[in-house]
Image (cartoon, grey):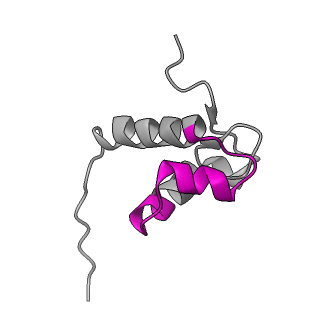
């Protein structure tokens, strides 16, 4: 069962960033819009290719995969 049927990752689209199927709107961009005060409803209302349900799916996708995020500290030689 595909939990995120409307999220695709294609190397030919946005360099493989996860995005909404049929668009060039990335999950990352949706999260940026949310972070600057947008709501799922307002984001969907401003973008004719989006629905509230698609925005919510992108949020669930980001939440699911951020749980497995690994932070690596990199030291640079000065």
Is residue 58 or residue 46 the one in the foreground? 46
Name the quadrant of the C terminus: bottom left
Is residue 49 or residue 64 the one in the foreground? 49
Is 3 drawn above or below residue 28 in the view shown? above
Q: Position of residue 23 (x, y in %)?
A: 75, 46
Q: Position of residue 50 (x, y in %)?
A: 67, 45
Residue at image point 44% right, 43% down: 59
Look at the image and say whether residue 6 sits in the magenta stretch.
Answer: no
Left or right, 41 with respect to 11, comes to left
Residue at image point 43% right, 69% down: 36
Residue at image point 72% right, 52% down: 24
Q: Position of residue 61 (x, y in %)?
A: 45, 36
Q: How many marks?
A: 0
Is residue 24 or residue 47 the one in the foreground? 47
Q: Which residues are magenta?
A: 32-52
Q: From this viewpoint, which residue is outermost toward the bottom?
A: 78
Is 4 drawn above or below residue 7 in the view shown? above
The quarter holding residue 76 reads: bottom left
Residue at image point 77% right, 39% down: 22
């Amino acid at each position: 069962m595909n939990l995120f049927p409307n999220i695709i990752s294609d190397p030919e689209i946005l360099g493989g960033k996860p995005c909404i199927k049929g668009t060039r709107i990335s999950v990352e961009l949706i999260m940026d819009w949310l972070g600057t005060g947008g709501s799922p409803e307002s984001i969907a209302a401003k973008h004719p290719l989006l629905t509230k349900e698609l925005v919510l799916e992108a949020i669930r996708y980001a939440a699911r995969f951020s749980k497995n995020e690994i932070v690596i500290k990199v030291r640079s030689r000065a």
